[in-house]
Amino acid sequence: MVRRNVFKIIILLLIVSGFFIPDAFVSAQTQQQERQSLEEELERLEREIQEYEDNIEITKQQKKSLQNEIYILQNKIRKLDLQIYRSNRLINDLRVQIDDTAESIIKTQEDIADIRLQLGKILQRIYEEDRKTKLEVLLVGDQLSDFFDNLMALQAINEKNKDLLFDIEALYEYLGGQKQALESEKVDEEYLVKISLLQKEESKSAQSQSENLLEVTKGQESEYQKLLLDKKKQAAEIRSRIFELIGVPEAPTFGEALDIANVVSSQTGIRPAFLLAVLTQESNLGKNVGRCYLKNTSNGSGVVVATGIARSRVMKPSRDIQPFLEITGELGRDPLNTAVSCPLSYGYGGAMGPAQFIPSTWMAYRDEFKDILGKPADPWNVSDSFLASAVYLVDLGANRDLYGAEWCAAVSYFSGNCSRKNQIAYEFYGDSVRAIANRYEEDIKTLEE
């Protein structure tokens, strides 16, 4: 009886050790086919987007006319529509990957639980057999050979036990990799959602520019040319234009923001137009993700300012809550009544003020900010946030006299680094910052004239 039971356990373990391989193989084949189809579609979209970009650049080189300006805006809107569609395709694909990874984690956890159950049965059997004396085991069998068969079976179980322990260790390692992959996929999805929000915002802005231009000129070329020649009127409008910033009670005018940027530029070497462009982009993000208050300092939950709906993940507990409490404490601010950005579908919120620093990143630069200002820097103060953003951008290489240094610094400001992967995934962010900086550079030239 003992011998038959031991052999049953061995056979069962041999089956358990490979039961999940076929499904994984089939899933990998399906994923490869879907990936190839997606890549082909993305390549097609990239070609179409580039065509619109080429049309825009060619038209910019031509004479400034109302017709050309409207044509540029129309091509920009079409290009943005394609970019929005591309972002949504990537987001949907990533969400499928997230679901697959989450399901795989559940399956791996079930595999581990099943093997642990089998391992427990083996250990129990070994424990029971070890408590018997050799004489007891000998008397159980009908023949002397049964005794030796039982000993050999137990030895085989011990060997399989070692293999099983190795398998469960490998599964735990695989599970850890899956959880890391899931976290990375969620972060990527969060960034892509933010990119999509920026694209939609820019598309609305381009549409509004086109409508306003037609309204101001009444569709007449002569009126457009008069508008171009009226530099004083343009300068007055530029200087008085509100420079929108997130997280401050009263936004400065463009002229006031430029004055601050010029001071910060003299301290750090950052080009004023580029600094203003980064802050504009970050404020656009801040407006889109909303504003939240931290209400629970243990799990990072809070409420949304606009709706008062309870939200989780307002701030990452292990990374940002303690730094946030230190920052607000040093400034004499109430941490539970100081606005930060809200989370989106995944990841965390918690970005502070116009420069949208997360607390842990701010803490890494806090002493440097203090040395420059001679006082603790305030993330919600306009001048302090300009300086903080510039110092961080210097670390990212934005003041280097190299082509593309600013673009790469902008991508890093958004995503953490300018790796090849991030350059491809977040190209829009860098391009958008560069386009905003170019517009601001033209505005600054108009003011100087």
Image (cartoon, rainbow, N blue to C red):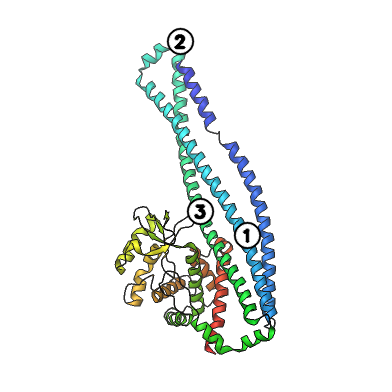
Secondary structure found at label 1 = helix
Q: CA distance from mark 1 to mark 2?
A: 75 Å
Are dots 3 and 2 in contact, CB under 8 Å?
no
The residue that label 1 is drawn on is 86
Q: Which residue is mark 2?
A: 143
Residue at the disc numbered 3:
186
The residue located at (65%, 55%) in the rendering is: 39
Q: Residue at x 52, y 31 (%)?
A: 16
Amino acid type of disc 3? Answer: Lys
Estimate the x, y position of residue 98 in percent, counting from the top left: 54, 49
Q: Position of residue 317 (x, y in %)?
A: 38, 55
Viewer-side residue, 304 vs 316: 304
Please tell me whether mark 3 or mark 2 is closer to you in this view: 3
Quarter where residue 390 is shown: bottom left
**In this picture, residue 50 sits left or right of residue 121:** right
The amino acid marked with disc number 1 is Arg
**Structural crowding at the residue carrying mark 3, measured as other residues with C-alpha within 10 Å and reported as few (<14), some (14–19) or many (≥20):** some
Q: Earlier in the sequence, mark 1 or mark 3?
A: 1
SS assignment at label 3:
helix
Task: Give the residue drawn at x 58%, y 37%.
Answer: 21
